[in-house]
Image (cartoon, grey):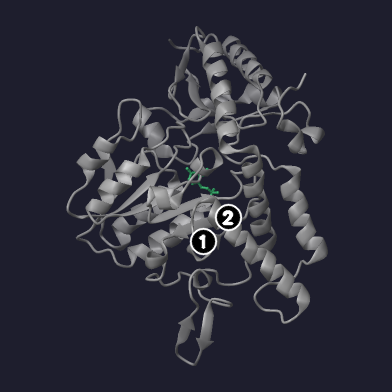
């Protein structure tokens, strides 16, 4: 019997009633209200924004800008501090490119081994392009970022700290507020990757005092194809856009242009209108469910999961103290891709490999891991099925297992 009070919001389970979806860290499922909102735009006022001098275009523009205001207030920002992008990756590349213009070979960027490649690689590229030094915060033995370790890694050359709020492999929450405060005392700008965090925790950018923060819509019940770059107003105003084109300028002559105010100067071309509206609806959906309810549900699942895992041999669990509901594990002696094969036949969707965070696997000296990640639609029955599949996998590979 399904006693989960949230599952019915997600139409995918009507089509796939047996689905055990354990890949929410890659992308969450979408509630019907988000799909309806996008459909409403396309069927009722699906025209371009900011350009048309007719009622439908005004209606679409108003809906788009209202969505910006709604998403901004959700993270405690002002509307013009929210730039819409295609995803967190684009947001993080955009801010690295803009800030990177001012970096020189005398500068260092501090980051961590927990970063997703989209938070790491835009800065790594600057080693070669700008001659910067890339420094890493030492992690604890279990792979956590601590305030003390960040403090110890800051040098007089550190100009930027690029850091994840929640690890997509280990589910650890970074103690960001104290880290940001310390970074600011040393005139370091802080760029936060909140792609995982936003799906699980309330975020208030003013309270955190981060300088820039990025996330995607699709991990927080919204559609694919939309992301956000938040930037402090005073800082965004000093940035010039990466992309140029339509709708981002106020005046163009033969050799110059005048860029529009923030955030429009960063949104060249026709934006993803339906997706922005869908994301705004996803924000309302989270408000209605509430973050405390999401966190309580995850905690209950996580406790149940770890209880069920007790005593199962031949497993390495990398994050038994995870703060959000993610399990990263391996069958000892079995490559995660080989181990993953059985799960799909049991309708269990989980992920195997590096999870776009290869430095985490390097840290643990493994070839990646299996990752089961949970959200509000998951049930204890899903966990029972996962445990059953783990036991079947152990049986299947029994002659290859190591201790
Ligand atoms: C922590 C983290 N940062 C960034 C990203 C990149 O998000 P996207 O692929 O939506 O750009 C992800 C996606 O898995 C992530 O988990």
Q: Secondary structure at mark 1?
A: strand
- Residue at the disc numbered 2: 71
Of the image marks 1 and 2, the number of the one nearer the N terminus: 2
Residue farthest top in this picture: 311
Tell me if residue 400 can be seen.
yes
- Left or right of 247: which side holds 210? left
Quarter containing the C terminus: top left
- Residue at the disc numbered 1: 82
Q: Position of residue 12 (x, y in %)?
A: 76, 37
- The one nearer the camera, 356 or 287, is 287
Disc number placed over residue 136 in the picture, else none = none
- The one nearer the camera, 280 or 152, is 280
Residue plotted at (66% across, 41% down): 288
Residue plotted at (31% across, 42% down): 178
Residue plotted at (47% across, 85% down): 257
Say above or below: 214 vs 403: below
Badge 1 vs badge 2, beta-carbon distance below 8 Å: yes
- The one nearer the camera, 120 or 354, is 120
Q: Secondary structure at mark 2?
A: helix
């Amino acid at each position: 019997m399904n006693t989960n009070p949230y599952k019915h919001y997600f139409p995918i389970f009507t089509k796939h009633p047996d689905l055990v979806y354990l890949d929410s860290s890659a992308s969450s499922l979408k509630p019907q209200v988000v799909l309806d909102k996008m459909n409403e735009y396309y069927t009722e006022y699906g025209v371009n924004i900011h350009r048309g001098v007719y009622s439908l275009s005004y209606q679409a523009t108003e809906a788009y800008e209202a969505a910006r205001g709604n998403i901004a207030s959700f993270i405690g920002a002002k509307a013009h501090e929210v730039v819409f992008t295609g995803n967190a990756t684009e947001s993080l590349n955009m801010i690295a490119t803009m800030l990177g213009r001012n970096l020189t070979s005398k500068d260092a960027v501090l980051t961590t081994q927990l970063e997703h490649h989209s938070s790491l690689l835009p800065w790594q590229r600057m080693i070669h392009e700008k001659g910067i030094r890339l420094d890493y915060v030492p992690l604890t033995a279990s792979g956590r970022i601590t305030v003390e370790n960040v403090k110890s890694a800051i040098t007089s050359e550190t100009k930027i700290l690029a850091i994840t709020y929640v690890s997509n492999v280990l589910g650890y929450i970074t103690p960001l507020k104290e880290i940001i405060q310390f970074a600011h005392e040393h005139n370091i700008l802080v760029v936060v990757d909140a792609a995982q965090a936003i799906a699980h925790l309330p975020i208030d950018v003013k309270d955190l005092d981060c300088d820039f923060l990025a996330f995607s819509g699709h991990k927080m019940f919204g559609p694919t194809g939309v992301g956000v770059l938040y930037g402090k107003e005073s800082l965004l105003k000093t940035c010039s856009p990466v992309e140029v084109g339509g709708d981002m300028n106020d005046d163009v002559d033969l050799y110059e242009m005048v860029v529009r105010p923030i955030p429009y100067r960063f949104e060249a071309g026709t934006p993803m209108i339906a997706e922005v509206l869908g994301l705004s609806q996803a924000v309302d959906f989270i408000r209605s469910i509430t973050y405390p309810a999401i966190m309580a549900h995850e905690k209950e699942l996580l406790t149940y999961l770890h209880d069920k895992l007790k005593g199962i041999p031949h497993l390495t669990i990398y994050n038994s103290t995870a703060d959000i509901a993610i399990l990263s594990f391996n069958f000892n002696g079995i490559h995660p891709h080989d181990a993953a094969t059985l799960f799909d036949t049991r309708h269990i969707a989980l992920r195997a490999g590096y999870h776009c965070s290869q430095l985490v696997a390097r840290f643990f000296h493994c070839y990646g891991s299996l990752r089961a990640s949970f959200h509000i639609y998951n049930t204890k029955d899903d966990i029972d099925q996962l445990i059953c599949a783990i036991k079947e996998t152990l049986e299947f590979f029994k002659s290859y297992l190591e201790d």
